[in-house]
Amino acid sequence: MTIKEVENQIVEEFSVFTDWLDKYEYLIELGRSLPIIEESGKRDANLIKGCQSRVWLGCEINNGKLYFKADSDAIITKGIISLLVRVYNGRTPSEILDSDVSFIDEIGLRENLSPTRANGLVSMLEQIRNYAISYSAREFAGTDNQDMGGQTA
């Protein structure tokens, strides 16, 4: 599936809920289903700055594709990062950099988050893009380094 197809799938899933409390419950369910990150992945290098909650996002590279592992100490935030991992996991840096994240607005997520959670969402998206930019630069330079500067999960 393409990024757009996954985003459309998420929009469709959220469309069955008419009330934002139900959508929050769904986010909580998604957060609970996110695979648990190893304790080694919960280090400061993987901590996303700008989030009210603690959110860890690690990245590994395999065959030119980025694979993410994430966790949070807040369940709704964990649900949000699980959506992003679902969309971007196993994608090339160019796929990530070319995506438009319009699904976030289509499901109404940004407008229904508190300002601090909305800032955290922006920080999560920036970190994913930073991983993609960093890998693109390494690939361009001919150094296919798998550890992303020590930030693997």
Image (cartoon, rainbow, N blue to C red):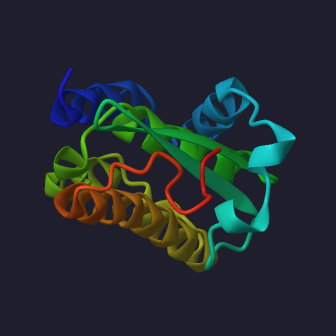
Give the answer, above or below, for where 111 lies relative to 139.
below
Residue extending furthest toward the top: 1
Near-viewer residue (98 or 28):
98
Residue 37 horizontal side relative to residue 80, left or right: right
Residue at the spot 60% in from the left edge and 69% down from the top edge = 117
Give coordinates of residue 6: x percent, y percent: 27, 28
Give coordinates of residue 31: x percent, y percent: 67, 36
User: How many numbered circles does the render carry?
Assistant: 0
For the N terminus, the image quarter is top left
Residue extending furthest toward the front: 142
Give coordinates of residue 11: x percent, y percent: 30, 35
For the C terminus, the image quarter is top right
| The quadrant where residue 48 appears | bottom right
Residue 149 horizontal side relative to residue 144, left or right: right
Give the answer, above or below, for where 32 lies relative to 55.
above
Residue at the spot 23% in from the left edge and 56% down from the top edge = 142
Give coordinates of residue 107: x percent, y percent: 35, 46
Give the answer, above or below, for where 108 lies relative to 87.
below
| The quadrant where residue 18 appears | top left
Near-viewer residue (60 or 101):
60
Residue at the spot 43% in from the left edge and 55% down from the top edge = 109
Residue at the spot 28% in from the left edge and 37% down from the top edge = 64
Residue extending furthest toward the right: 39
